[in-house]
Image (spheres, rainbow, N blue to C red):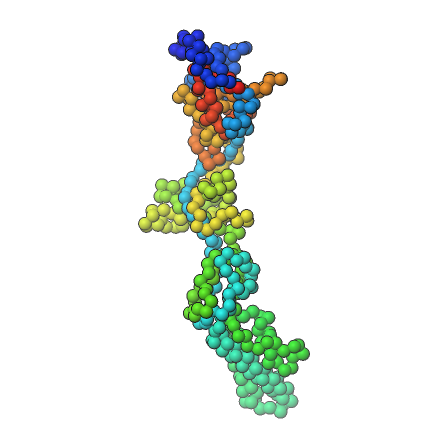
Amino acid sequence: MTPEPSRHRSGWTLLVVALLAPPGFTACSGEAPGGAPGAQEEEGGHQAGEEHETHADQGHELHVEPGSLAGWDVEVGPVARTTITAEMVLPGVLTADENRTARIAPLVPGQVARLGADLGSRIRRGDTLARLNAPEFTRAQTDYLRAYTQAELSRTDYERALVLREQRALEDREFLRRQSTYEEALTGLQAAESLLRSLGVEADRLAELRRSVDVTSREPPGRAVAPFLPLRSPLDGVVTERNAVLGEHVPPGRALFTVSDLSVLWARLNAYEDQVPHLDPEAEVVIRNPLLPDREFPGRITVVADRVDPDLRTLRVRAEVPNPEGLLKPNMYIRGFLRMRDPDRERLVVPEDAVQLLDGEHVVFVEQPREPGEEHRVFRARHVTPGEILSVGRVIEAGLDGTEQVALQGAFTLKAELTKGAAGHQHVH
C-alpha cells in the first residue's frame, strides 16, 4: 500500500501537533508494538477490500482515559442480532377500537336533569352518565304497568278456565275467548317490556316495577314509575366525548356521550400502490410513535382493504394494538413496521449512528480488550460493509463476527476526537 503523504512528514506533523494540541491531548504516530492490530482478515470480510480494511483497522485507534470518556455519552455493548429479512414501513394514525366503543344517546326526547360523568371519566359497565326528564319514558313505564296488570288478570282468568274445562263446566267458545285474551295480554306485555329495555331499563328494574303493582307478592313493594330516564354505559372504558349540557333539551338519537375501551386501539395504516403486491396479512407488525422513540407496540393485522382509495391512492390496512399501559392515544400519528422473519437466518445489526464515515470508509468503533492493570480504554475503527437500514438498526454484511463490543452510542464523538490530530493513533487524557 502506498504510504500516505502525511507519513513522509511524520516528524513535522508531530512537531506541529505537539505545539497546537491543547493541554491533556497528545498524539503519537507509528505502528503499535507487536505489529498492526486488526490487520488479520475478519471472517466473512471482503478480499478485494483488504487494503482498505487494513488501513482503517491499523491506522485509526483512540486511547481514552476513563475520566475523559465519562463526559462523551459513549455507550458500549454487544452487536445485536435479528432474524428480520424484510421490512415495510406504513404511515398511519391510531383510533379507538370501534368494536369497543359505545355512543350513548336517548331514544326519546328529554331534558338533561343531572350529569354523572365528564370527559375523561373512567366508567364501569352500568354506570349512569346522565339522567333526563323524559315524558315518553314515564309513559312507557305506565304502559308497562298497565300491560302487566292486564296480563296477570288474563292469566288468572285463563287458569280458572282450564280447571272449569276439565270439569266440563265451561263451553269451548268461552274457553277459547279467555285463552285469546290471555295471549293478547302477553303480547302487549312483551311489547311494553321491549320498549323499556331499549330505553336502558334492566331486568332488576322491571322486577321492581312488577312488585309495585303485584298485591300477591310477599316481597316488599317496589318503586313505581321512575321520574328520570337514566343513560347508562354498556361497557367499561373512558368517556372520550361529552355533548351533554345541564338543562338542555335533546332530541332522540343525539349522542350525548362516547365511551371507549382504550386498552386496545386500531392502527389505521396506509399502503401505497407499489407496496400492495408485498403486503402479507400474516406479517408481524409493530407500531412506533415519535413521542415514544424507545418503545415498540406489537399488533396484529386484522383487515386489508379490497379497494384502493381513489383520492389518496392508498390501501387501508388495519391492525389491533394492545395498549395496557395507556401510553398510546387515539389520533396519534404512527408508523407501522411490517416484518418478515426467517428464524434460520440471523443478521448482525448496530444502531444507525454507530456506523460512521471515516476517510471515505464505513467504520464502527470496536473496543479492544484491556490488558491486566491497564486503565485506559482503546477503540479501534473497524472497516465494515453496511447493509440496509431496518427499524432495529443497520445491518452489517461484513467486518464483524458478532463477538465484538462496539460503540452503540457516541460513535461520532469518538470519530471527532480521532480526527483532531493528523496521526492515526490518538491518546486522550
Compared to residue 51, the image places residue 406 above or below, namely below
Position of residue 16 measured from the top left corner of the image (x, y, whole percent): 42, 12
**Where is the N terminus found, in terms of image quarters?**
top left
Q: Nearer the viewer, residue 345 or 236?
A: 236
Compared to residue 401, the image places residue 425 above or below, namely above
Occupied quadrant, residue 248: bottom left
Number of numbered discs visible in the structure rendering: 0
Q: Is residue 249 visible?
A: yes
Point 55% across, 49% down: residue: 324
Point 43% across, 43% down: residue: 335
Left or right: 371, with 30 as reference point: right
Position of residue 369 measured from the top left corner of the image (x, y, whole percent): 57, 20
Q: Nearer the viewer, residue 79 or 357?
A: 357
Q: Residue furthest left?
A: 311
Compared to residue 211, the image places residue 61 above or below, namely above
Compared to residue 352, the image places residue 58 above or below, namely above
Occupied quadrant, residue 146: bottom right
Point 53% across, 83% down: residue: 180
Q: Is residue 100 visible?
A: no
Left or right: 213, with 313 as reference point: right
Q: Nearer the viewer, residue 300 or 124?
A: 124
Point 44% across, 20% down: residue: 419
Position of residue 67 measured from the top left corner of the image (x, y, whole percent): 55, 23
Left or right: 416, with 237 as reference point: left
Position of residue 337 measured from the top left corner of the image (x, y, whole percent): 45, 41
